[in-house]
Structure formats: C-alpha cells, structure tokens
Image: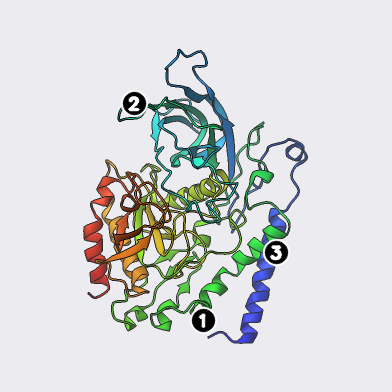
Amino acid sequence: MFKISSMRGYFASSIGVACATVLALSAPLPAAAAGRPGVHRPPATRPVTGATVPGSTQSFPLVPLNPDRAAGTAPEMGLAPQSVRSFSLVGVVWDDPATELHGHVQIRTRASGADRWSAWQDVETHNHGHGPDPASDEGSSSRMRGSTAPLWVGDSDGVEVRVRAEADQVGGTRTPTLPDGLRVELVDPGAEPGQGALAPSSQADPVQRSDEDLPYGGTGADAIASAVEAGLASLNASMNASMFPAPSDETTNEADVDQAGEVRGGPSAAAKPFAAPRPRIVTRSGWGADESLRESGFVYTGSVKAAFVHHTASGNNYTCAQAPSVIRGIYRYHVVSSGWRDIGYNFLIDKCGNIYEGRAGGVDKPVMGAHTLGFNTNTTGIAVLGSFTSTAPSAAAVNSVAALTAWKLGLTGIDPRGTTYLTSGGGNLYPKGANVRLNVISGHRDGFATECPGKLLYGKLGSIRTAAARLQGR
C-alpha cells in the first residue's frame, strides 16, 4: 500500500519529469522548418541518450497513372519513384473511412544508401475490419480516415506506389473506382530509448504532415496534460488494485517494472483457482511510445469476456530487435495517418514471443481497443506481428498468445475453451445489436469477414485454447 506522503512525493516527481519532457518537445523549430508550410516537426538534430528520438510521417498524394484511359478501363493511381527522407513503414490512406478500397496496392522501396530497388510488394487492402466501432466517439471522429494495413519495409529512402481498382469478384457489376484523397504515408518510427540515433538528414519535403495535422500532438496544455499522464503511468499501475478492483487476489495485480520497462508477474497469480501467472509484458515506455501522439485519458468497457487474435499484416521481414520499432511505426500510423485515438491493439506479440502493451490504460484493465470492428466492447485484441496467410507463426508467438490469454481471461474467471455472447456494434457479418455467440478466444475473422489473422495462425487457435486452459489449471 502507498502512504499518502509517498504518493504526494511520487506525484510531484512524476509531474517534474513530465514537464521536463514537454519542455524538450516544445523547443522552437529551426527557422527554415518553421517557415515552410506542411512540414512535420523534425527529430532532434543531435544524438539523444535515454529518450526516444521522435519519429515523423511523410504524406504524398497519389495521382492518376492512366489519365487518358479508355471507357471501362480500371483507374490507376500512384506515385512515381521518389527520393524521400528515411522511413521504415508505409501504408495508403484515403478520406472516407466508410469507403473500402476495392483494388490492389503495390509498393516498392529503396533501402537507405543503396541503389537497387526492392521487388513490388502487395499491401493488405482489406483493413476495414480493424478499427474503432462506428458508433463510438473514436469511430465517428472527423480525424478518421480509411487505410490499408501498414507494411514494414525497413530503413528506406525511396518509394514508388501503384494502386489499381478492380471490379466485383462475383458478377463484376460494380464499376471499378478508387476512394477519394488517396495518399501514401511514410512512417519513420524514430529511435529507441537510449540508442542515441541521429536524426535523418534534412531536405526539402513540402508534403510532410504538419503539427496541425497531428491529432493529439503539438505543444501547449494538451501536450503537457499528455506528458503528465504518461509520467504517472507507473503510479496508476501501482494503485490499480484500489482504482479498478479485479476479482483475483490483490497480489495478482501487483507487478515489478524493471528499468527496461518490462512488467514481470509474481508467483501469487495462483492464489485464486483458474488464475494463470502474469506473463512478462514490455510496457509502452519499454518500446518507446511517444505519449504526446495519442489522445489523453483512457476509455474502459465492462469486464473482458473474450480475446480476438489478429495478425498485423505488416510482413515478416523484421528481426525481434526491430519489433519495438515496428510497433512504434504501427502506433504512429494508427494515430497520425488513420486518425485513431491510440494504437488499435491491446497487446502485440513478436516472432520471438515477446509480449508488448498496446493501447494505454493498464494491461489488467478492460481498455477499449480498436481491433475488431463491431466487437471492441468487453474484449481484448491481441496482434501477432507479421502476416500468416502463407507463413506459419512461430511456436514462441503461439505459446505467448496462450500465456497472455490465460492470464488476461483468468482475471475475470473466464475459461479459454468456452464460448460467450457479445453484442455486435455493427459489421459485415453481424448487424448492430445482434447477440452473437463466439469462442472466448476467437480470430478476427469470427467477428468480421476478413482474412485476419491469416489461415495459418487461425488454425492454431484450438491448441491455444487448450494450452491457455492448462495454464489456468483447468
């Protein structure tokens, strides 16, 4: 238990750290950058030690590639080969989030410092089912945009894009069209805490996102509030038993946060029958989340009744050491490019089985995510980094999904092998208000018509349910 005096001291020190962070973020822009419209705040120009080097987002409009096309020919949009500032993750967005992109998106990139271009890579376009429920405040926000899945390409400084519309696969009755306002988003995730990486070289970039385009960033009172909130995150974790009592023993909610930002569960998780041990979880500070990007505050639902398993569809060409960078890229893409309030998933897992905290608000709380359109209430979303339509997930990742669901569902006494009823918020499988019976551990495709989490990860859900139940002592 915290004493009032120690709580006051912790609160004061947290505010001091947060305000110092805000002062660093609020430093004046260089004169050249400040006078150039549409330029995102550049990262620091000197090595940074002990803090995350901020990332950035470049945004380029796509233009017609076949403006003189014959009647009935599918429209094509794209971007000619461009030399750009360094980026590592890419996706395509458009104006109306309710409009789907019926077509193919392909991207090729050039690795930084190299002359050769990559082969063309397909980008997953059927991303509509990921995101906030349409009726929620987040889902009805004017900041929302339609978006493809993000694709991890590694450190690159060149890009080319082509997007081609397609007719309906069945019947072909719909005239091929593309959404309005197509843009390619190039995300630099920034450097990790303590890496001391140098900022990318400065060059003219008239189409980068401006500070005004950042939905929750910038300076002033909002940034101060966000930074203070971030500074108090560990205080919230220490006080969570009194703020949000869980049905498990009080000690189950206690955790040690080490200097690397990792939450380590204690042996007391077995104090309640069918409660699994808390797995090791890398916190947001551990993977370098820039808390000034997201919306301040948290949104909670009722108790977690089910877990939806996803893949990020961002490709498998990353190393486990790069996983925090991939997550920072997805986070920035979800917030800055897609207009969500925070990263969509509640948890993420890499190919080595490392588990990461996703959306802010407390790993043991019923935080409302933006992962399964229509079923974000009373659920948690777990995404494995990668694409698993034709590539099998690693055993380490599968084991971590089982460990995480065993613990998370065990907090509310849920049997991972069971079923539950959820009320649909609206989607392409179930209308709004439908009472739907689903497996407690379901794939994204069970709640929305999508390929996610890929057939090879989806095929592992049966063994995940069995392993999770065993970890709960069932």
Do callouts 2 and 1 mark residues in contact (Cβ within 8 Å)?
Answer: no
Crowd around label 2: few <14 · some 14–19 · many ≥20 (10 Å): few
Count neighbours of disc 3 (C-alpha within 10 A) and say few if under 14, some if 14 to 19, many if 20 or more: some
In the displayed structure image, the side of residue 421 where residue 160 appears, left or right: right
Of residues 164 and 302, the one nearer the viewer is: 302
- Which is more foreground, mark 2 or mark 3? 2
Q: Secondary structure at mark 2?
A: loop
In the rendered image, which residue does mark 3 sit on?
19
Image quadrant where residue 125 sits: top left
Nearest to the observer: residue 311 or residue 104: 104
Residue 270 shown left or right of residue 262 in the figure: left
Q: Is residue 153 above or below residue 283?
A: above
Q: Is residue 392 visible?
A: no
Q: In the picture shown, does residue 411 fall above or below 286?
A: below
Q: Secondary structure at mark 3?
A: helix
Give the residue number, with chain letter if any, for mark 1: 242
Q: Quadrant of the C terminus?
A: bottom left
Residue at point 47%, 66% (across, down): 301
Report the residue marked by disc 2: 172
